[in-house]
Amino acid sequence: MHRPFKTVLLILILGALACPAHAAGTLIAHYTFDGTAADALGNYGDASMDNTVYEDGGVWINGIYPGDDPSGAWVQTPSITDLDFAAFSVSVEFKMSEAPGDIRPILMCGGLERWLSAYLDTDGRPQLRYNSGHIALTGTEAVSLDAWHVAALTWDGTTATLIIDGQVVGSAELSLNFGNGRSFGAGDGGAGKSFRGHWRDLKIYNGVETSLPAEESSLGAVRLCSASGGSARRHSNRTSSRSNRTGRPRPPRVHTKGVLTLERSAPFSLIS
């Protein structure tokens, strides 16, 4: 083996050994909500909680927005100051006993900045939203009731991905307006919406976490719509993910790669 080739090979091996920890993501905050509002890692202060009840291994949120009614429930972490906007992941477990009946956030990122969120539409279908509520994509299958699910969001610097129960609902290339928002919660202070149901085990990572938790899912196999699908076109007039040379907004670019297929065969696709 020639010396230059050995040198290049050694560099590649050393580089690979140095990268796994970053590639897998680093857990920086973990709020279990199992009888406590504390960060299990001790890195940050307690989450703010109003009109909530600890039960079923998590916290019950009544779905009433406190800005409209003082009996409304609210859950939000303090500012996660070490969050790296270049790449991060966040996941939470949730359970509903009834259909949402209204659009409701599952997981809101950024506090009032609202730069990324996992949402439910009125029928309980998951949505990826960004920059104060613009819809990037929507699933066709509703999340099942009376069962715990895991919602996760990842960001790699250009692309946001929504994952439900370990299955990729979809991905979109976006330009997120972070501001200085680094808190996470179950309410949307800008739209006046709140999650209704049980919420637990919020985890926040720096980097794209590759081993996010998954529950057995009733949503079936995953397929993603094409980049020319109706979902992206439908929102092209009211999203501001990217601009072309004329200054007009471009729709988010929806990815079709990385399809996950489980044993179940029911399609879980984007609305077309």
Image (cartoon, grey):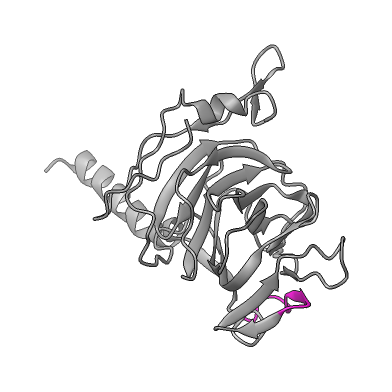
State the residue in front, 142 or 148.
142
State the residue in front, 263 or 177.
263
Q: Position of residue 48 (x, y in %)?
A: 77, 74
257 sits left or right of 142 in the view: left
State the residue in front, 259 or 106.
106
Q: Which residues are magenta?
A: 41-52
State the residue in front, 178 or 171.
171
Q: Position of residue 84 (x, y in %)?
A: 62, 55
Quick check: can you spot residue 41? no
Residue drawn at (70%, 17%), measured in percent from left and top?
248
Q: Position of residue 47 (x, y in %)?
A: 73, 75
- Farthest residue in the bottom direction? 35
Residue drawn at (62%, 58%), measured in percent from left and top?
100
Q: Residue 195 appears in which quarter of the rendering?
A: bottom right
Answer whether residue 15 is magenta in the image.
no
Answer whether residue 51 is magenta in the image.
yes
215 w.r.t. 219: above or below: below
Quick check: can you spot residue 251? yes
Residue drawn at (57%, 45%), measured in percent from left and top?
128
Q: Residue 132 appears in which quarter of the rendering?
A: top right
Q: Position of residue 162 (x, y in %)?
A: 50, 49
255 w.r.t. 81: above or below: above
27 w.r.t. 101: above or below: below
* Picture quarter with the N terminus: top left
- Farthest residue in the left direction? 1
